[in-house]
Image (spheres, rainbow, N blue to C red):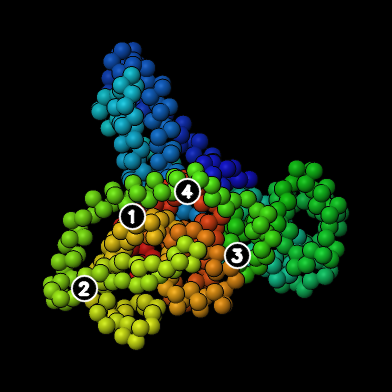
Amino acid sequence: MHIRVLGQNMPSSTALLAALEAALFFLVLIGAGLLRFNLDLQAADLYEGSLWPRGMLFSAMMFTSLFAFGLYSARQRARTTGLMVRVVAAVSAGVAATALFFFLVPELWIGRGVLGLAAIGAVAVVTGVRLGFKHLVDAASFKRRVLVYGAGRRAASIAQLRRRSDRRYFLVVGFVPCDSEPVMVPTERLVTPAQGLQGLCRALDVDEIIVAMDDRRQNFPVRELLACRLAGIDVIDLLTFLERETGRVPVEMLNPSWLIFSDGFRRGSLRRFTSNVLDVVASLLIFIVSLPVMLLVMMAIKLEEGWRAPVFYRQERVGLHGSTFELLKFRSMQVHAEENGQAQWAAKKDPRVTRVGAIIRGLRIDELPQILNVLRGHMSFVGPRPEGQQFVAEHAEKIPLYGERHSVKPGITGWAQLCFPYGSSTEDAVQKLQYDLYYIKHSCLIFDISILMQTVEVVLLGTGAR
């Protein structure tokens, strides 16, 4: 079962984790107050005021911060180091937000000593709970038991899911073959509804049925599925299931009608306003903070290649609704890297990359000048990565729905950049398009903030960079 929280799907096991941590955050602040005043609740209440509303505020701030940093994401694949970076960053942001709220509302003021102890306790709580919870989530008792109706090509896409994170929250109990399609899943995983579909679901303790028939026009079991649905068993189509579990829209089996009738794709005036505010605020903050680094990079490029060498790399890219604009980057390759005028895929250990370029590409510092593109309205901070016209033309001919990624502004960072490593082929472009379509479908302010926060790990640890 999934629960919608702040516009995002959250598995029930993750929701349980969030509820447990929220309760512990509340207790952490209460405990910090008692510890600060030698376990004397009356003295703490007399000096600080009642700890209960402060504990609730601290818990809410910490939950929101952890959510924004992607720590409740169903597709969280960070290693231990990356997880600790996110935990410390999320707790720091939560404590800062709590302190700001206390400052703005003096009636809820709390001492720095109590808040400091609560911060230490919060890091310990998150670390300890997640180390223990990791094993529980992987246990079969926390996974939804799903039955796949179909055993052909479309059903095989479920059996072929390779990423552990994509299979983390469900367990396939079997595939029901259909007479009208060939079997393309392992035969040992086939099950036959001798007692009817509903009887099979009861026998296998099924929570959800995935309809994955290759052709629904033939022998579609309307009555049986309806009986299962009325019996409390969820019924879901394959595309919606894959989108929910993998965080991408599978274009290879997509039909336009699914996009037309599905939820999402909201582009109201409020969404445009929140996106513009986030772009301006994030860009100005990062520009101010990174200005010394940018000046150092500019000097390093000049020192390596001469004072006449250009600092910026400019390339025409495709933006919103197919319009073009000039993308800015710090130049990381030799001046004549594209002498023939043809764009080329970057490669590992690319000989065209300079020594300074290798450093700034690895740290993603070469992307910083794109802040100017955001402030000029050519890009958003979060969105699909912009591509050159040559690549867009090639991909549009080969990849269905590739042009739909231009229905929103391109971004400096995005969902595809977090979920998929650097792409250097048409096949990689297909994979990244699936994540871009998922972002466009579910785009909202909270999702943007979550992506922005999770980008911290990419920048600090270099994952996905080339």
Gap in Å between the C-alphas at discs 3 and 1? 33 Å
Q: Residue at x 37, y 63 (%)?
A: 463
- Where is residue 260 drawn, in percent x and y? 66, 57
Residue type, numbered disc 4: Arg
Residue type, numbered disc 1: Leu
Residue pointed to by mark 4: 272
Q: Image height check: is 78 above or below 388? A: above
Q: From the image, which quarter does the C terminus lie in?
A: bottom left
Gap in Å between the C-alphas at discs 2 and 3? 41 Å
Dividing the picture into quadrants, the one containing residue 258 is bottom right
Q: Earlier in the sequence, mark 1 or mark 2?
A: 2
Residue pointed to by mark 1: 375
Label 2 with label 3: CB-CB less than 8 Å = no
Q: Image height check: is 352 above or below 124? A: below
Q: Residue at x 39, y 60 (%)?
A: 378
Pointer 4 local density, CA inside 10 Å: few below 14, some 14–19, many at least 20? some
Residue pointed to by mark 3: 250
Q: Residue at x 70, y 57 (%)?
A: 237
Pointer 1 local density, CA inside 10 Å: few below 14, some 14–19, many at least 20? some
Direction from residue 134 to residue 217 in the image, left or right: right
Gap in Å between the C-alphas at discs 3 and 4? 27 Å
Q: Residue at x 46, y 34 (%)?
A: 22
Direction from residue 177 to residue 293 in the image, left or right: left
The answer, for residue 254, to whether it is visible in the render is: yes
Callout 1: helix, strand or loop? helix
Label 1 with label 2: CB-CB less than 8 Å = no
Direction from residue 18 to residue 152 in the image, left or right: right
Callout 2: helix, strand or loop? loop
Gap in Å between the C-alphas at discs 1 and 2? 22 Å
Q: Which mark is residue 310?
A: 2
